[in-house]
Image (spheres, helix red, strand yellow):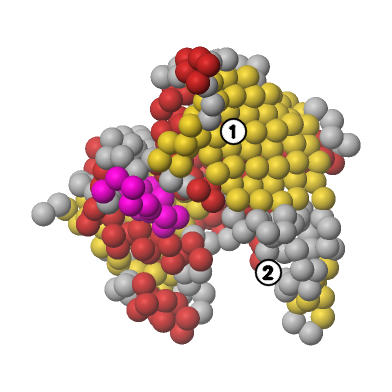
């Protein structure tokens, strides 16, 4: 039997549901050094929070996140709330000596992200760990792509293409949500979707984006909100060019207006010896091209379900596919392993800050007619 650690999670909507599944299942498939105990679920509405706690398997419910953080039976605080609350909750939890898992993007502003990264670095000196929940890093095919790049299998990186396409806002009469208000979400498709592909591109290449030229657009300026209409104050789509520190070029696109695309996250990396391509709509596959194949060269479909592929050995026999929810189980497995091993997990809050700086640079560029904007350490 491994030692137990109590988890307190704030938020119980979409991310709360999938995080709950991960905490419930992780120790049943992975040999983690700590067994999570679903101690308490936090939410604003007492009735709905209690109902969610019962449904998802949490032992208790709280309507005050401060009370949740202060509980003696909570060792990990999992933040699944809108971005405007990330910094306040994370800073309080780290100060209280609680390990923190925080959903992406890390914050709504660079200043908030800087404060969180600084607090995380200080907390790490006391053995308190923190991690950003960029779950796409935990797709086995994405993790395998990073491994192949690191091994030099595709040579020097020349170009990266990353897109994240959804269509759930294509109807101009779709109702207002918190994701369409800057004060809650920070930004629109740029932060919600763009954050994922920025992190995935930097993760797979092992390289950092140093400058961008971008543009954003809000196609529908108001939406039904109660008896009237509310103003949309975030972007609906963002497109930008990027340069990496190695000199590689990148193109990025994030939109909620790509009809027919429900959750299409794609990444292609072109190098001097080969290329890799991934599409989340076929998440168990990685397309690989190698010049070493000579006259037989062509993109090969690699089914990423072998036991020696990242994360896969904990699940089913080869060819038996895994799904979206598994990426979150991989995420919390890595987090628990880092806590148990007394090491800093990745992606760290510092990694989250780097992504936040890219997002801020894109917005700055878009506000200045797509002017090339460099990404500095103090942005």
Disc 1 packing (10 Å; few <14; some 14–19; many ≥20)? many
The residue to which callout 2 is attached is 177
The magenta segment is 317-333
Where's residue 366, x and y in %?
82, 40
161 lies above or below 1: above
Secondary structure at numbered mark 1: strand
Residue 177 or residue 96, whichever sits in front: 177
329 lies above or below 291: below
Nearer the N terminus, badge 1 or badge 2?
A: 2
Residue 255 or residue 56, whichever sits in front: 255
**Numbered tag placed on residue 268 in the rendering:** 1
- Whether residue 326 is in magenta: the answer is yes
The quadrant in which the C terminus is found is top right
Where's residue 188, x and y in %?
70, 54
For the point 68% across and 24% down, which residue is it? 249
In this picture, residue 300 sits left or right of residue 59: right
Q: Nearer the viewer, mark 1 or mark 2?
A: 1
In this picture, residue 235 sits left or right of residue 21: right
Secondary structure at numbered mark 2: loop
């Amino acid at each position: 039997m491994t030692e137990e650690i109590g988890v307190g999670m704030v938020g119980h909507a979409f991310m709360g549901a999938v995080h709950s599944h991960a905490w419930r299942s992780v120790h049943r498939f992975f040999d983690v050094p700590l067994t999570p105990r679903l101690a308490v679920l936090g939410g604003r509405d007492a009735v709905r929070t209690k109902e969610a706690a019962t449904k998802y398997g949490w032992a208790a419910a709280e309507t005050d996140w401060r009370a949740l953080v202060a509980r003696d039976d909570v060792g990990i605080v999992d933040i699944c709330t809108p971005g405007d609350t990330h910094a306040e909750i994370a800073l309080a939890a780290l100060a209280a000596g609680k390990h923190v898992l925080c959903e992406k993007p890390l914050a709504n502003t660079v200043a908030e992200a800087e404060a969180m990264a600084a607090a995380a670095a200080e907390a790490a000196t006391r053995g308190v760990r923190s991690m950003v929940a960029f779950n796409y890093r935990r797709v086995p095919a994405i993790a395998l792509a990073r491994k192949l790049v690191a091994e030099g299998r595709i040579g020097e990186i020349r170009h990266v293409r990353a897109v994240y396409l959804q269509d759930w806002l294509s109807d101009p009469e779709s109702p207002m949500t918190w994701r369409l208000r800057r004060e809650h979400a920070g930004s629109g498709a740029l932060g919600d979707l763009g954050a994922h592909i920025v992190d995935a591109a930097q993760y797979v290449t092992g390289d950092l984006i140093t400058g961008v030229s971008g543009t954003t657009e809000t196609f529908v300026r108001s939406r039904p909100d109660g008896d009237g209409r509310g103003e949309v104050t975030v972007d609906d789509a963002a497109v930008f060019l990027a340069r990496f520190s190695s000199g590689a070029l990148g193109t990025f696109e994030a939109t909620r207006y790509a009809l027919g695309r429900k959750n299409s996250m794609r990444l292609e990396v072109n190098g001097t010896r080969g290329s890799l391509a991934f599409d989340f709509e076929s998440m168990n596959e990685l397309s690989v091209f190698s010049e070493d194949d000579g006259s037989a060269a062509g993109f090969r479909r690699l089914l990423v379900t072998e036991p020696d592929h990242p994360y896969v050995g904990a699940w089913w026999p080869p060819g038996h596919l895994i799904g979206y929810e598994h990426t979150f189980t991989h995420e919390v497995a890595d987090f628990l392993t880092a806590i148990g091993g007394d090491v800093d997990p990745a992606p760290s809050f510092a990694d989250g800050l780097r992504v936040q700086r890219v997002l801020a640079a894109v917005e700055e560029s878009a506000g200045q007619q797509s002017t090339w904007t460099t990404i500095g350490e103090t942005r």
